[in-house]
């Protein structure tokens, strides 16, 4: 598949934006600007390759580690940061927080704190889309840890028998909190979990955003052409702790360094673009600065925004 | 000098004592050890539980007695209930009370009903430990107080201790009891210290405690709100208001006698409960007094719950949502005025 220079550039910028967004969060949590711990996706930026084949009105259902995906879907970093700060200018008026960002106008249907649940919710919009012939797809993102929830298996079976335009994206970053995939999952070939339900299922390398993108493009196309659901298993790695402030200790420092040095999705993509002649070191530094500036502005916006009125506590329980 | 330890340490001591005295006690939950499955023993005990309650347990008890589980609450709690039917005494950790939704049939239709439905032929000596309580700024899926849901179901014993001493003794009783018991641990209490004996002791199931004696009003407070009520009671002494603070400790069975006796003495009642108001433990206690103690009431009965909303994330909103000492004080004064 031939991608334009602009498209490739956009991918790099979104990856840099994802990293720029999550990088300052440690300090913001320690300074209590952000009132609670958050989950960063640093190291997993290749996974946002799944967003590019989607249209704005395709649906995504995300989990606790979703900032990068949401930014790639087009959400405004200012309103995301404000939400994480608990400010009234956030996407959910400060009622949701980092784990529950939603922006239906971008098809971002809401991040979920209950692991695995998105895999049943996701079939709703795809069911509706099929019923009304909207030709939209619906995507659920969940970790390998969450893939051990019963929900996931029910959700896949239902999507398969009704041939729904659902795409299951399993982000295997090797650890669920302090528990390794080798321990928690009965097979290390997680694509088997989709195949068991007759769903076309693929393992892709998350350090290569183009491989992720290409496979996603194919399964999105299949979904739009009424060929039913697919499962994409992305092999990836998180550099940071499960959440800010966690004690670590369940993996070696060498393992983390090894991933950083050899499988960093941004570094790999940068090298690829330089090889193509689409990027220079200087241009890369400029793009990095640009991303940082956007996030600095977002932090400033969040910081200066007001908190919601206490009376907001009681509103919106019902429609 | 009397030894003081934290609520969290009291939980760990209770668990360890029951494990030492009964080889059938095993514990299961997510990340209770941490670092398992890598084939590298130096990684073991990385976490010792998400809140480090079971830190060091793997060293003493080995991986045969403490099990890290996949994120499959239905499966590992179901297996524990099954094992309890033939003699094991599993203690399972449900990381947050909010997650009971993903495995609710275990609680609603299984452990709770087997004894009765099988005509006494089965029993389920399982203990479920879970954390609860808002105030952590973690939003709607990690803050909900929902002990009333379990209290509603016949067949469960439910305990929500407020002190390290009560915690340890009740946990030991819970694990040794042949009924399913749900233990609600308030996360804001984890670091709170109190005097706790070193040895093995059990506290009577269903027995509450008078945390502070008084004569003008009975405040029945639950779990995380007990200490607040005690602080308010101390403060109001200066205003010549004498508050009796009752901690039922056990929500099921409920120490009805203790509550009724106190109301008989004071003639006024406030129930403080961090759960949502509808069909709550507070509602239940108010009903108890309305049915059996209405003659004792001289002015008013009142309850103070969190509002009828999910838990909001923003600190401003969560502060508004939460029970505070100020709210308790105002509620007491509104009863007595
Ligand atoms: C039903 C449920 N059980 C447990 C948790 C607590 N929890 C939050 S994240 C997490 C680990 C998730 O691992 P994974 O699904 O692999 O995603 P990752 O964090 O690695 O991105 C756990 C156990 C939860 N939020 N929901």
Image (tube, rainbow, N blue to C red):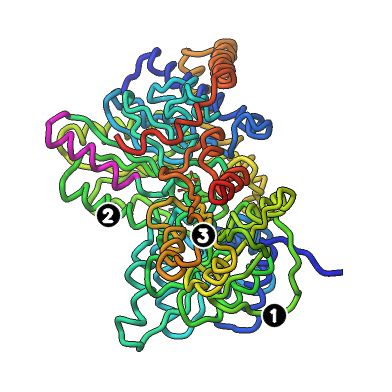
Output the chain of dot 1.
Answer: B
Q: Which residue is mark 3?
A: B298
User: Foreground: B160 or B335?
Assistant: B335
Q: Nearer the viewer, mark 3 or mark 1?
A: 3
Q: Mark 3 to mark 2: distance in Å?
A: 57 Å
Magenta stretch: give its range: A118-134
Front disc: 3 or 2: 3
Q: Is residue A137 magenta?
A: no
Residue at 74 percent of width and 63 percent of height: B194
Instruction: Please state the horizontal and vertical placement of residue A56, each as a whole percent of the image.
Output: 30, 23
Which numbered disc, 3 or 1, marks the residue that appears first in the sequence?
1
For ligand 1, tell me if the residue under mark 2 lies within 8 Å.
no
The residue singled out by tag 2 in the image is A154
Residue in the image at 54% along x and 59% along y: B268
Q: Chain of mark 3?
A: B
- Mark seen at residue A280: none
How far is mark 2 from mark 1, CA to CA? 45 Å
Is A160 drawn above or below residue B280 in the view shown?
A: above
Of the pair B175 and B188, the residue shown nearer to us: B188
């Amino acid at each position: 598949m031939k991608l334009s220079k602009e498209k490739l550039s956009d991918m790099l910028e979104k990856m840099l934006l994802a990293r720029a967004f999550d990088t300052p969060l440690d300090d913001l949590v320690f300074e209590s600007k952000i009132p609670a711990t958050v989950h960063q996706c640093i190291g997993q930026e290749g996974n946002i390759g799944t967003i590019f084949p989607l249209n704005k009105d395709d649906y995504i259902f995300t989990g606790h580690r979703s900032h990068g995906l949401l930014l790639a879907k087009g959400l405004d970093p200012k309103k995301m940061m404000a939400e994480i700060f608990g400010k009234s200018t956030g996407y959910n008026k400060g009622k949701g927080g980092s784990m529950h960002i939603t922006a239906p106008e971008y098809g971002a249907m809401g991040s979920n704190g209950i692991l695995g649940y998105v895999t049943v919710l996701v079939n709703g919009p795809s069911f509706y889309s099929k019923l009304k012939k909207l030709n939209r797809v619906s995507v659920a993102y969940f970790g390998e840890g969450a893939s051990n929830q019963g929900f996931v298996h029910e959700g896949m079976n239902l999507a398969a028998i009704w041939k729904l335009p659902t795409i299951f994206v399993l982000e295997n970053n090797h650890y669920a909190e302090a528990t390794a995939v080798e321990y928690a999952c009965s097979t290390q070939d997680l694509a088997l979990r989709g195949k068991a339900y007759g769903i076309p299922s693929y393992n892709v390398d998350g350090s290569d955003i183009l491989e992720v993108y290409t496979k996603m493009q194919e399964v999105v196309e299949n979904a739009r052409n009424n060929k039913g659901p697919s499962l994409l298993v992305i092999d990836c790695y998180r550099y940071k702790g499960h959440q800010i402030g966690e004690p670590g200790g369940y993996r070696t420092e060498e393992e983390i360094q090894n991933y950083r040095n050899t499988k960093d999705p941004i570094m790999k993509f940068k090298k690829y673009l330089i090889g193509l002649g689409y990027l220079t070191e200087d241009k890369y530094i400029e793009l990095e600065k640009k991303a940082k500036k956007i996030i600095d502005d977002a932090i400033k916006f969040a910081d200066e925004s007001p908190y919601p009125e206490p009376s907001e506590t009681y509103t919106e329980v019902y429609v | 000098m009397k030894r003081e330890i934290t609520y969290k340490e009291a939980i760990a001591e209770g668990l360890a004592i029951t494990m030492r005295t009964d080889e059938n006690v095993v514990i299961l939950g997510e990340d209770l050890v941490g670092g398992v499955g890598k084939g590298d023993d130096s990684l073991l005990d990385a976490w010792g539980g998400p809140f480090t309650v079971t830190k060091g347990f793997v060293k003493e008890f080995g991986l045969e007695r403490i099990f890290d589980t996949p994120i499959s609450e239905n499966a590992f709690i179901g297996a524990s209930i099954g094992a309890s039917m033939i003699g094991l005494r599993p203690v399972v950790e449900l990381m947050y009370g909010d997650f009971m939704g993903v495995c609710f049939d275990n609680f609603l239709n299984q452990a709770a009903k087997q004894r009765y439905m099988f005509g006494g032929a089965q029993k389920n000596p399982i203990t479920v430990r879970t954390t609860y309580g808002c105030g952590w700024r973690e939003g709607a899926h990690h803050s909900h107080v929902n002990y009333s849901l379990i209290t509603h179901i016949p067949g469960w014993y439910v305990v929500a201790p407020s002190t390290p001493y009560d915690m340890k003794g009740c946990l030991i009783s819970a694990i040794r009891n042949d009924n399913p018991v749900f233990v609600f641990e308030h996360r804001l209490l984890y670091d709170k210290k109190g005097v706790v004996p070193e040895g093995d002791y059990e506290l009577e199931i269903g027995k509450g405690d008078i945390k502070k004696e008084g004569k003008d009003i009975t405040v029945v407070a639950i779990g995380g709100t007990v200490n607040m009520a005690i602080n308010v009671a101390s403060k109001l002494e200066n205003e010549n208001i004498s508050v009796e603070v009752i901690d039922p400790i056990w929500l099921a069975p409920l120490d009805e006698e203790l509550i009724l006796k106190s109301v008989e003495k004071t003639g006024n009642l406030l129930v403080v409960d961090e759960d949502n108001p509808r069909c709550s433990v507070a509602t239940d206690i108010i009903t108890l007094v309305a049915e059996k103690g209405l003659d004792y009431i001289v002015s008013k009965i009142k309850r103070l719950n969190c509002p009828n909303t999910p838990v909001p994330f923003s600190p401003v909103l969560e502060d508004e949502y939460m029970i505070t000492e100020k709210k308790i004080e105002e509620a007491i004064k509104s009863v007595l005025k």
